[in-house]
Amino acid sequence: MSAHLLCITSNAGLPVFTRKKGSTESLPFSIMGSLNGVHMYAKSQRVKLLNSLMDDHCVAWKEFHDSVILIGISSGCTIQVLNKLLDSTFNAMVLTVGIEKIKTQRNTERLKRDLRMSYSLIDRLMESLDYGVATNKYSSDIISMTETILCSENHLLQVALEAYTECVDSEYSCILIHGKIAVATESWWSLHADEIKLLSYLATVDNMTSSKDVPVFLPYRCPNVAYRFVACMLIPHVQVCCLCGPTPLIKDIEYSASQCFKSALEVIETALRCHPRNLPNSIQLESGVLGILLINTKFGKYVVSRSPSTSSSKHTSNVSHRLDLLRTFFYRAVLSLINCEAEENKPEAEKTKKPDKVNKQLSKKDILTVCKETYWCSEYYKCHALISECNILCVLYTASIPTHTARLITSESLRILTTDKQLCW
Amino acid sequence: MQRNKISSNPAYSCDNWSDSNCSSCSDSESSIPEWESCVNPSGELLFIECDPVVSYSSNRLDAENNDFSTKNELRHSTRTKFLKILRRRDSKRRSKRTVKNSDLISTQDTTKVKFQDNEDGEIREVTVKINQERKASGKEASIEHLLGITVSTLSDGNRVMVAGFAPDAEAAKQKSIKIGDWLKCIDDFEISFHNLNEVLQQFTTKNQVVLKLQRVAGVDVTKNPPINELSNQSNFVHELLNVNSEDDLSLSEMLCEYPIGIVYINTDNLSESGPEFEGIVYGYPHPYEKNWLCNCRGVFITLNHLLHDLTHSSVHTSSMLCNNKLTHIGYKRFGSKLFLLMLPDNCANIKEICLIRDELLRMLEFMFQSIDHCFEAGEFRNQLDHFFARFFVRVLAGDWHKMNQKDTLLNLNDSNECSVFKFESVLPVAAHLPLPEEAQLQIDDALTELEASDYREWNEDPLDCRRLFTIIGSALYHSGHLLSSHFVHGDLIDVHMFCRQQGLFHLSRTEPVRSLVLWREVYPVSCNPGVPSEVNFIPEGRRYLLVVGSGKDLLAVIMEAGGCTEPAEDNMGPDAFYVEEVQATLAHLQDIGISNLASRWINENFGSHVIAPEFPIKRKTDFLSNISFVKSNLSSSPKDIGTQVQKKPEITSILKRRSSDHGPLFSSSLASLVDDNVEIQSEDSSSQGGYSDKGDVSDEPVLGRRAIREKKNMECYDDESDIEDYRDGSQSNSSYDLSELRQALLVDMADKRPDRLTFGNENVLYHYVQLDEKEGILLCPSDAQVYSTALDIILNSFRKCAQGIHDIFQNTLRLKEMLAQDVTKWVFNKSLVAVKEYGTLFECSLADDANKKYDKLTFWVIGRLYYIPHPREVYVCYQDSIPQNIVEISFKLGTMTA
């Protein structure tokens, strides 16, 4: 139950940083050297080493911009998730220092020092790996996606947020409750999913002060020029964040925040009460449901609720394990299905360019196969996922629910959650 | 298929050959078996002789099946005293098997009989109806399907001759069509062998045609199969038989351009300053300089060590980009040696490469005792090169190739479209074709008799020498489907892997094999001291694999020399007597119609219970929209749903069942759910249908059935008191009428209708797989007769999904095994514990706008794992219209094999 993450410069093979998670020793230097060495040697043979799989472990190598190599080793998770983690980690590095510094590497020591800022982000990213360990504090983290919270007050917050956004002369802003996005502007959602996720983490990690003003390089939007990321605390655990240029000053932003949200404070406090459940109390799901995970693949956001039905909340012992189950189910059963769809769509696009000869027989490319539902039955629980366009709802059930009933409950729950205007899903 | 060629040398003609065999019975000592010259110095033999038939009918029918029965008559040379003694008596045994043969030959055998009809040149016109069913079935129009006639050529190789009739064909009832007639015209179109198919195409729409036939008299109408090896060997057979090192060398260089390879490395004492390819024990393709794998081997040697040290588990695969092509490497460690296999992703994905690697290694161990021995002994090098050349060409081409290997490589379309997933074909299991009980009984009977090798019946005097071999197991295949196996499970898998990789199954499926004999020393897993086995005592001795084939049938036998029999000699070749014995058994099985039965079973999809998918035509209110309609009312109480259903009687399945059967269950479950998952019975088994039976229990009835069958078998044996008579070789055997038996088998099948595995009025099952890795048996429908793109795509999705499900199940099984061990050392994901059912719903839609009128096709792929009595996995793929119960389907499947 361990994970390691190494970052090594491509040319010199110097270690930039190593991070680890779980109960494990740090990697000896010789092993780090060998791990880098095999990749380098393969490169000299015009071969790009990607990954290696073992019984329960996997190792992945990924080189970015011919300048740094990230190597990840983890137990218990799939290679797909590990690869995504490497991507996100690199994005976190870009976010803190900008792409230029990583590419040029004039001074490795300097780079190392600058990257130290990103450690807390990277450590948090590593929480997205799933091991099936119940003690995980952040077992609701899902790779490459941002957690949100659905409060019935969201539509009110949205109005206040729009006003605030205008005041600070920005387009990008959002409100975080316990680090989960309650509402955000349209432009905020237009950012890359990894950017949104990293910014949310950035707002919550190392929170010493009431407001935060750090330069960020958006890995996809503009990796060369830094924006200012400003997060102001409205009340404890509730932050309003925005991206802005050199002006306005932090003081002005803080002032705007207090002005814009002054009238909404009560609403915010009610919304905060939604926290551990992440769903408003008004929404009651069937009692056989132990947890739900609602995902929007278009924006890369999700909401997870461990005990949507109040009646089963008396069993709190294994609630975090439930989240782990849901996450593992999503990683193993669902993630592979949505990804393969993306791959299959590619040749489809090529195909439309040149229409084939008229063929009476259906050609293979004329038929699209998409996955709609999937489920697992274990001896102890049941998982069911329903994929409907960009929304995916995964539900964890008790083992006693018949599968066909589970299907009905899932589709009904999805309808309730996605159609409620107040929640701003 | 090959053109017919007339042998210029009648001495080698088929007739003469068989005739001479008949005579050779009397002076047996003189003749030697046809394969004798092919035995190589190490005693190994691979002899294949194919019929140069022009239109090789896909199902060999009654008329063609007596090839072997004539060969039965042959009993020739021997090398041992033992056999000389036996020979005196063996005719008795034969007489039992071939009682009726003489009659059969004269009336039915088409390839060997001379027609000496005296009605010279009489021309007749016959009206024949075209078989509408066959036409509708969408099969390729062949004369056999349309008219019910099988054809061959007259001696000039061009004129078409009536060679036989399809079973139940109308043509067969026409008295005026006779076997041996020259088929001159169809509806005034003159036909020759070349234009036959074209002409036929024109009649596919007609209802009846007029055939003009002429009786040919006094002429030797049988085409004489040319014995010229080159002309009657397809490329495939040619490559199988001939190890041409020059060809292999150039092929090997061509293969170097692909990211493929195999290498066996000794990782001990590697130094940085050593010679360039230090440590490589064996590698393919040559030369090593151009071989990707050999050049990069350092990476994998290091990784293998490093990752093992780091994680304490062995490395399975590595992936990399070679020329921007995703490529996988499979590892296997043997002490300090390392075996690597490299294949591109479009040929084998990660899961497949692991299975292929294991299969290769298993086969090599079977052939050469140990991997070390196989690669280190230089003597096998040519053989290995030859094998791997064929292996890689096949893998790259996606299947066994029709052209010769180099052309196949040149024609490889590099831009392989979507990758094809393999599931059933790469698992270490044999596809089993369960025949009706009576037939199964006959097969078991024949195999048992062969294995018993009880030759007392031929010899009243006590034998004064030991027998040469003990038969330790046998298995009968038809077109690559296992009909019956008497091997221990491990050996069956060994034999199956061997035949699959060597292409013997492909051979029997596609080539007109007249005779195949394979002999080599093998090391079956049950007797391999290197492999830990359940049996403690393994007798000293050597084992040999003998595979005998004819038509689509293969009979594989493992024999043991040493132990209680004569000790083995080095480089022992096949023994004529045993080969004949096995051939006779195979011929006997064909005589009683097993082969036909199996062919028909496969062709008519008996017992497979599957349908081909069709896109539903759009209706205004289809079932799905109904469901969603009702679903949206779920928040109301279950009672309401019940009334909903009554209003809409066309929605039967989910809802009705739910409201009737599960109304109470639903509410009770609601109550029990509150108590989390403590005392929960596994309700999930009612996957879609909603029967609340408990999954694992269903295994027991299967057991019961099996037991019953076994018991039945026993009773049968008891009833057949003539078992004793066999031994005595007494006359009661003459009542053993083969044709009656054959008739009985077929009639038996005539009223056999496939049991449907799914619920509902219509069959909705597209595919199923029952996997029993312990027994090495796989149960799945025979290959699709009707080609359908939709089916192809659905099956591809099925296989891909099944791979994933299989993976999860493997995890579950691994966990079960480890439960006893130290819990704290677990590194795997605990969330994966005890997953026993896994299903996915897919939706297929036509991208083309022109196909608007078709609706979407939705189907389920569901896998389920059973633990008791040993792990068994069931995978099904069915249309999502009527809710099904996977447990029920599994149960029905279970009873099929039992």
Image: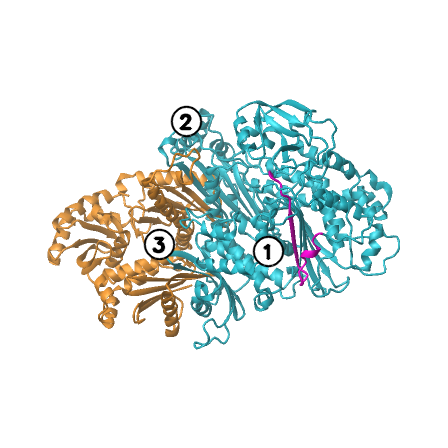
Most extreme residue toward the right is: B461
Residue identified by numbered label 2:
B619
CA gap, disc 2 and disc 1: 60 Å
Q: Nearer the viewer, residue B799 or B47?
A: B47
Q: Answer with the quarter of the image where residue B181 lies.
A: top right
* Residue B733 percent across, percent down from the top left: 83, 41
The three-letter amino acid code for the residue at tag 2 is: Arg
Report the side of A326 relative to B98 (left or right): left
Secondary structure at badge 2 equals loop
Residue B155, disc: none
Using the rendered image, report if marks 1 and 3 lie on a common chain: no
Residue identified by numbered label 1:
B242
Q: Which chain is orange?
A: A
CA gap, disc 1 and disc 3: 62 Å
Most extreme residue toward the front is: B8
Residue identified by numbered label 3:
A140
Task: Give the colour of chain B.
Answer: cyan
Nearer to us: label 3 or label 2: 2
Region of the chain picked out in magenta, as a range: B34-55
Q: Chain of mark 1?
A: B
Q: Chain of mark 2?
A: B
Task: Check residue B641 for magenta coloring.
Answer: no
Q: Nearer the viewer, residue B89 or B16?
A: B16
The three-letter amino acid code for the residue at tag 3 is: Ser
